[in-house]
Amino acid sequence: MSVKKDDTVKVAYTGTLDNGTVFDSSEISFKVGAGQIIPGFEKAVIDMEVGQEKEVKLNSSECYGDYNPAMVTEIPRDKLPKEQEIKEGMMVLMGLPDGKQIPARISKVTDEKVTLDLNHPLAGKNLNFKIKIIEIS
């Protein structure tokens, strides 16, 4: 039995960047075709069988998309809590007008302004995966 659309699969995977840095290693279950994971990963598991292993290299367009400079914004420093120490590289949640929150990475801090990057941390990066199918249901 091989993986097809609408199957629920359990996979073990290790994800690396082109320089060999491991960014994630885990087991996940997802429904194929439901858009629960990045498109390239979902496409890679189609036709695989239980126990089969595969290595795939995905372009950024098949993952989190290209890095978008328009998703970088500056806000006044006083818009963030004064009691919280703000540092470059920190992740913060930004409130949207509809009440939802989205993660943003602080990319620069000055006395007056904070630069927020709303791109996914892996946007613009090619990703490599070693995938093993554990279960198909």
Image (cartoon, grey):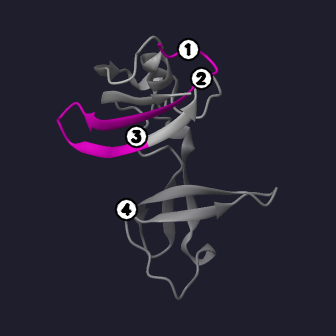
- Residue 41, image x, y percentages: 44, 25
Q: Are marks 3 and 4 in contact (CB under 8 Å)?
A: no
The answer to which of marks 3 and 4 sits earlier in the sequence is 4
In this rendering, would 7 be left or right of 42? right
Q: Specify the amino acid type for callout 1.
A: Lys
Q: Within 10 angstroms of label 4, few (less than 14), some, or many (20 or more) residues?
A: some
Quick one: which residue is furthest to the bottom in this view? 83
Q: Is residue 57 visible?
A: yes
* Mark 2 residue element: loop
Q: Within 10 angstroms of label 1, few (less than 14), some, or many (20 or more) residues?
A: some
Instruction: Return the residue at label 4.
Output: 89
Q: Quadrant of the C terminus?
A: top right
Magenta stretch, residue numbers: 1-27
The answer to which of marks 4 and 2 sits earlier in the sequence is 2
- Residue at point 58%, 81% (across, down): 81
In the image, is residue 17 above or below residue 58? below
Quick one: which residue is furthest to the left in this view? 20
Instruction: Return the residue at label 1.
Output: 4
Give the mark toward the camera: 2 or 3: 2
Instruction: Return the residue at label 3.
Output: 122
Q: Are marks 2 and 3 in contact (CB under 8 Å)?
A: no
Q: Are marks 1 and 4 in contact (CB under 8 Å)?
A: no
C-alpha distance separating marks 2 and 3: 27 Å
